[in-house]
Structures are given as structure tokens and as C-alpha cells.
Image (tube, rainbow, N blue to C red):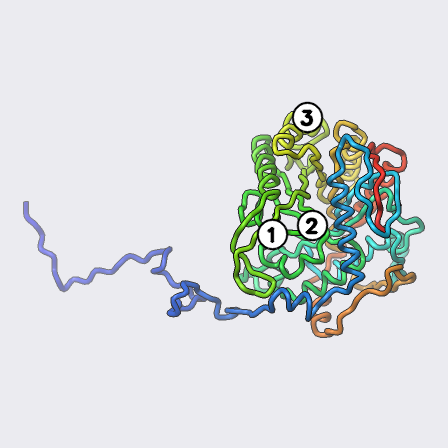
Amino acid sequence: MTVQEVDPKRSRTPPVWDYGLNKQSTNSRPPSSQGSGLLLSEKFGHSVVPQPEVLQQVLYPTNEELKQKILTYRNYINSLIKTDSNDSAQPNILPDTEIVENKPLLVITGPEYIKDGTQAKRCAQWIAALTGKRNYKVVGEMDGVLEKEITPLFNPLTSTDRKDLLVTMRTNLSEYGNGDNDQAIMSYEIQYGIPICRVLLTELAQYCPLVGELSDTLTPQYVSDLYCIGLLSHTYTESQLHRELASGVSYPVGFQVYGDTENAFNHKLQSSIDAIYSTSQEHHFLSVTKLGSVAVIGTTGNSDTFLILKLNGDQQDSYLEDIAPLVQLLQKHIVEKFVKIGRPDIKIMLDIGSIDNEGTYKYKELLLSQILANSEVSRYILGVIIDSGDSYLPESLDLEEESQSISGPPQRFDHRELRQSLFKNVGKTHEKLDKFFFANRLLQRLVELSQKGEVKISNSLKLIT
């Protein structure tokens, strides 16, 4: 065999790799020489944020009246969660409240994600009007049909009886892709900044109780004092970081269960139950303190937790399509598993998603009515979650308050630039209000069910004024 000699002058070109460190993006900069190992964006780089303590206590504090209102709502919601499903005993007495005979249904409504500060404020004002705290006059030109639909929503003839529903607003700031730069991956709270988001939440909290999304593990340090409830998506139920976070917050937390098949649903159900048990235990982990330093944080555990079951049977994207599998699931799986972890007082919220047509409304209204009328199921039901859409008032219209809340005028900050940035329109606000109209209609239906006694949940509880 003859061995071919290699010409030393012959050049050899290395292959062009499509991955790894050999390929430099046209938009990237050379590797950092500072030894941090981080490749920072030339456009954004570092953006310094004040310490949580500075933002909460100095720049954008809440007044004592709002603090007390939030604490009262938290205690009240805790009492709903802690009430034994088989016990009609009265829970702890809450200050400055009235006694009612029925346990109200907890309702979480609002957009799935906040995309526009103005529309978010309109949503909070709608909830305030719905519950009889405020009344508004709709100002602007509109046709007769729109006027007939819109006016009663913000100035109802009869408000929702607070004995029947406790309505809260979902304030999820974790939506990605709100800006013009499609290549930048950032959430609403990062794009517009923590200070602006805190201003928004502070204003919303004066209209109704707020529900926060615990998707980011650091931002709750800045805004968590404004929340009455926290939600954890099924995406994060197996995350140890989020279980640690939930174990340290001072308000109830709901864990979402979702799966498009029975096996996937059962897996997520077990993960959520594991997360609820883990959250109730003490944890020690590294985190950022209120003063901005890194420290080992110790939590006492949080047992004020509940499950969220998603019901979207009409779209065939949820395992729970009707009441039969829900009853079986409760009797053979959920209750038994919660007894094993020492939580026989399990509470469940039903997420019915959004409604944008008459057929979907009739299906979900019937399904919800059957669930709440079934004594085997309803005693475990804490409430419902309704996606009321992104739009609440057309851009051409405005609201003027006709009657002031008994708690006084809303707290306002004299930061004009921040407020102008906050309430500017982000893109084009959708004029489609169908989800909003159907959500309002379903809430009124829930009140009717309660008044007729079809919602078979009764306990002597204290209700917030």
C-alpha cells in the first residue's frame, strides 16, 4: 500500500460551525474580558433599579388606609380558605366588618395579562362599580347600541351584593413582547420598569383587591405589599425557586393544574399537591433583601394555599370537560391526597377562561351552575377565575366619577412623566369588548345562583365594607 504524502503547503480550512462559541452573532459583542462570563446587550446592558425598600417606603409608598384595606382583604380571604368544608363554624372576627350569613364566592377577573395601563385602570373601575363602591358617567360620543351596553357596566342600577361575590382583579405583568422591538425578550414589568408598574398597581389597589402572578422571583419584593392573592402557573409548580417564593409571601397562593390529557392532568395535579405541601414548610435560600443585599432568607411556610382547575371543555383543550370527571377526581384523588399531607380543608378555584360568543357562554354557564349546585363538589369550591379580556372602554370614551368611595379619594403621585408613560396607549387598543360583556353577564348570573340558594355553601363570615 502506498501512502500518499501530504503537501505541507496545502492549506486546510476548518469547518464553519452553526453553533457554539465559534459562531459570533452579528448583533453580539466579543466575550466579556471582566471574568463574569456574561455577554451583555450593547443596547440595554445594565439598568439600575432602586432597592425594594426605597421604592416601597420612599418613592412610591402606600398610605395607611390602603395598607389596612389590603391586610383586611388578606385576612378575609384566608378565612375563606381555612373554613372547613364540613364545618359551619364562624371563623375569626375581622375588624370593622359586618356579619353575613352566606360565604361569598371568590371571583378573580380581569385580563389574562396586562398590556395597556389605561385599560387595566378601566377594568378596576368596572369592578368598583360592579361591587357598588363607585359610579361613573361615560363621557364621549357613541352610538345608541354601544351606549346601551357600556353605560350600565360603569353605572349599574343595582350593584353586586357583597354577600354573594368577592370580586378581585388579576394583574399579571409577565406578558412578553409588548414593545416595538420584536427581538428583545422582556416582560411588561421589565419593559416599562418596576417604578411605573408599582404606580399602576397602587392606583388599581384603591379600586379593588389585586391578584398578582408569581412568575418572576424578584419583582414581588417591589410590589408584593399590594397583592391580596398570588397565582402560580402550572409551568412553575415544579420549580423549587417558586415554591420557596410562595412559602414566604404573606398572602394566599393558588397553584394551577392543567393538562390536555388525563395522564398530563394527573401529573400536574400531583406536582401541584407536592408544591402545596412544600410551600407549607420552612425554607432557607439565597435571595435579595429589601435593602438590595444578598442574604440567606428563612421562611416560616405558607399554608394558605389552594388549587386552580382549568375548565375549557368547549375548546377540547382541557381534560375536565364536564362535571362527571370533576366529581370523580375530587372523591378518588384530590381529597384523599390532601388528607395525606394534612390538608383536609382543600379549596379549589375553577378557571373557566374567556367567553367571546353566545354558545361558549351557554356551555360554561350551564357547567358552572351544575358544579355549584352539586353539594359533593361545591363545598370544596373557593371561587372562579374569569378572563374578562383586554379591552373595557373604547379609546374615544372617558369616565367621570359620580360618587366617591367611602374610603376617600384615591391616592395619587405627583410624577407626571411616569404617569404619562404609564397611561399612554401601547399599540392599538382592541375595540372588541365581547369578553368583557360576557364576563359581566356571567358575574351577574353567579349572583342569581347565590340568591336562589343554588350555590350550596353557607357559613357565618365577616365581610369587608
Mark 1 lies on a secondary structure that is loop
Q: Position of residue 184 (x, y in %)?
A: 54, 62
Q: Position of residue 383 (x, y in %)?
A: 76, 40
Answer with the quarter of the image where residue 402 lies: bottom right
The N terminus is located in which quarter? top left
Q: Is residue 44 visible?
A: yes
Mark 3 lies on a secondary structure that is helix
Q: Earlier in the sequence, mark 3 or mark 2?
A: 2
Q: CA distance from mark 3 to mark 2?
A: 28 Å
Answer with the quarter of the image where residue 292 lies: bottom right
Label 2 sits on residue? 251
Residue appearing at x 36%, y 61% in the figure = 23
Q: Position of residue 369 (x, y in %)?
A: 80, 33
Can you tell which mark lies on residue 331?
A: 3
Mark 2 lies on a secondary structure that is loop
Callout 3 amino acid: Gln
Q: Residues within 10 Å of mark 1 (few under 14, many from 20)?
A: some
Answer with the quarter of the image where residue 340 lies: top right
Q: Residues within 10 Å of mark 3 (few under 14, many from 20)?
A: few
137 relative to 283 in the view: left or right? right
Q: CA distance from mark 3 to mark 1?
A: 31 Å
Callout 2 amino acid: Tyr
Whether pointer 2 and pointer 1 mark residues with C-beta atoms closer than 8 Å, the reply is no
Label 1 sits on residue? 215
432 relative to 132 in the view: left or right? left
Residue appearing at x 21%, y 60% in the figure = 12
403 relative to 388 in the view: left or right? right
Foreground disc of the pair 2, 1: 2
